[in-house]
Image (cartoon, rainbow, N blue to C red):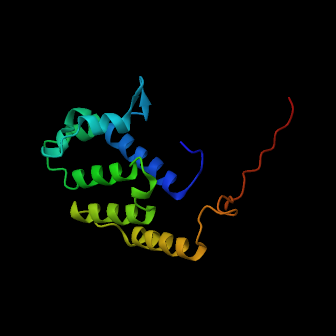
Amino acid sequence: MTNQLTEKSDVYGFGVMMLELLTGKIPIENGKYVVKEMKMKMNKSKNLYDLQDFLDTTISATSNRNLKGFEKYVDVALRCVDPEGVKRPSMNEVVKEIENIMQYAGLNPNVESYASSRTYDEASKESGDLYGNNSFEYSASFPTTNLEPQ
């Protein structure tokens, strides 16, 4: 809304992507916004927040089984898309919560995943402002193209 890129705007975009993964829908479809639709359809007092009919068919097909961590995942996604940026978690908090959800669901995040979240945290502390002047430097090399006229 402000056209300013911040860490919190990245968190918002990540939250939208999390909801896309759950629903199998694009962010805006037929004039309906996935964030608003999710909030309107959910009922936190019911199993799976009563979102079975709103989920991607692959997920809803498994909803007869226990989807451990589902509600926690939805909660994290909705915190990420909070309209107020100051209420959104940091990406480091999101990574840690996703790792906790994986452990709760019986999946152990591998050592590399833990190391990457720790590395992200350390990098953000070292650099201070992740969105400063040098934050969007491309670290890989650009592919070389050999275009010849025909």
- Looking at the picture, does residue 116 appear above or below residue 35? below
Toward the viewer: 8 or 73?
A: 8
Image coordinates of residue 21 in percent, x first then y, are: 36, 43
Left of 24 or right of it: where is 116?
Answer: right
Quarter of the image with the C terminus in it: top right
Say left or right for 128 vs 60. Answer: right
Quick check: can you spot residue 81?
Answer: yes
Q: 135 or 89, which is in the foreground?
A: 89
Q: Residue at left 36%, top 39%?
A: 35
Farthest right residue in view: 149
Return the x and y of residue 4 as percentages of the image width and height.
Answer: 60, 49
| Residue drawn at the location 19% of the way across and 55% of the way down | 68
Question: In x, y percent, where is residue 60?
Answer: 22, 38
Residue at 19% across, 43% down: 49
Q: Is residue 139 left or right of residue 68?
A: right
Q: Position of residue 141 (x, y in %)?
A: 71, 58
- Residue 88 seen by the camera: no
